[in-house]
Every structure is written in structure tokens, then in C-alpha cells.
Amino acid sequence: MHESEFARIGARLRSEGLVNANFGNISVRDVSGFFITSAGAYLDCPGKVVQVPFEGPVPADASSEYRAHREVYRATRHSALVHAHPPHAVAASLVTDEVVPRDSEGVMFCPVISVVEGKPGSDEIGRNVAEALRLANIVLVKGHGTFAAGRGLDEAYILTSLVEHSCRVLWQLGAFHQPRPESSPPPGD
Ligand SMILES: [Zn+2]
């Protein structure tokens, strides 16, 4: 059941360029844990989905980013999570601590997107993402990607797509362009 749903969402993420190669991961909440894509899975062809408990040992084939998913499910009421690497959003995360969309949907659905830090697969990313998703449905991890939450996978996917669109618009507006350093005058004598 989960395999086909994961494949459907994975194909959408892939077709929009929100993930590439075998990066990104998807999960849905279960009664005593959650189901997540396996480590290194292609999201549009995820194969076996792995069940991870909230407590206790984690199967070795679970996505390496299971800590972030686990912390979010422990700390919030979200039912589904999509982690992707949308390029314009990743670029934005490297030059700002907070993304403020200006397009109409962005203003409506995610008026402020915070940027947090944490190495991939670490406890730190788990804590920071879970903390941010207590109050929001999407967060950016600096230089890495998005974690979007929802009542279902569609909601989390749509939000991921929407944030990438907002960031693309901001880049096209030049909102993130860094001012060039003042060129120093040529040395005189
Ligand atoms: Zn990632």
C-alpha cells in the first residue's frame, strides 16, 4: 500500500526536479512509528518501504535521515513528511536565515520559511527540524533541502513544490543577490 503512494509522490518530486538521483526521503506516520523510504532509494521507484518504531532499534535499511522524521513525529501531530533538495530553495538557504515569499501562493501558504542548520542524518538536524515544524509546515535546512509536513503526502509534496516556486520567483527578482564588494581603487603613487 505505502509503496505505490510513495512511488506516486516520488514521481511528482522527480518530474519537477525537486529531488535528483537517489536523494530525498518520504514517510508517513503509523500507530507506533512510521513508514519511510529505504536508504538510497530512488523516490520514483522506492521499492521496499521500511517500518521504524518511535522507540528502540531502527532497521539498518531505513533512510539515513530517519532521525529527523522520528523527531518530527514525536514532537508534532504531522502525519506525513517529504524531504527534498529543491535547487532554488537550497540556494536561498545559503544566503538568508529566513525566506519571505512574494508570490501570491507563497504569501498565503508559507509567509515565512525559517532556515535551520544540521549535518545530514545527525541528531542535530532532527532536533532543529522538529523544533521548526512544531510551528510551521515546512522548514529549510541550510545548504541541504526542505522538510515539509502535512496531514498526508500530497499536502507535504504540494508545499515542497510551492516553496521551490516561491524561491525561484525571489531569485528571478534578484532578492537574494549579494551586493558586490566595493572595488578598491587602483593603487596610486
Ligand atoms: Zn537530504
Image (cartoon, grey):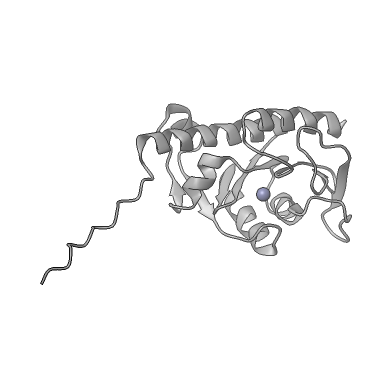
Seen as rendered, the residue at the extreme bottom is 189
Measuring from the top left, give residue 135's x and y in whole percent: 56, 48
Taking depth in this image into account, of 180 and 123 the one nearest to the observer is 180
Q: Which is nearer the eye, 179 or 51?
A: 179
Q: Is residue 108 left or right of residue 48?
A: left
Quadrant that contains the C terminus = bottom left
Q: Position of residue 48 (x, y in %)?
A: 89, 40
Total count of labels: 0
Image quadrant holding the N terminus, namely top right
Vertical position of residue 84 compared to residue 62: above or below: above
Residue at the image point whose x is 50% and y is 37% from the top? 110
Residue 173 left/right relative to 57: left
Q: Is residue 53 left or right of residue 117?
A: right
Residue depicted at x 43% and y 37%:
101
Q: Residue furthest front?
A: 189
Say which quarter of the image contains residue 173.
top left
Q: In the visual, does 108 lie left or right of 127?
A: left
| x 35%, y 50%: residue | 178
Q: Is residue 85 visible to us here?
A: yes
Q: Is residue 99 above or below residue 164?
A: below
Extreme residue in the left direction: 189
> Where residue 96 appears, x then y in whole percent?
43, 52
Seen in the picture, residue 182 relative to 155 is either above or below; the reply is: below
Residue 152 at least partly seen: no
The one nearer the camera, 32 or 51, is 51
Residue 122 placement (x, y as % from top left): 69, 62
Identify the residue at image location x=48%, y=28%: 105
* Quarter where residue 7 is shown: top right
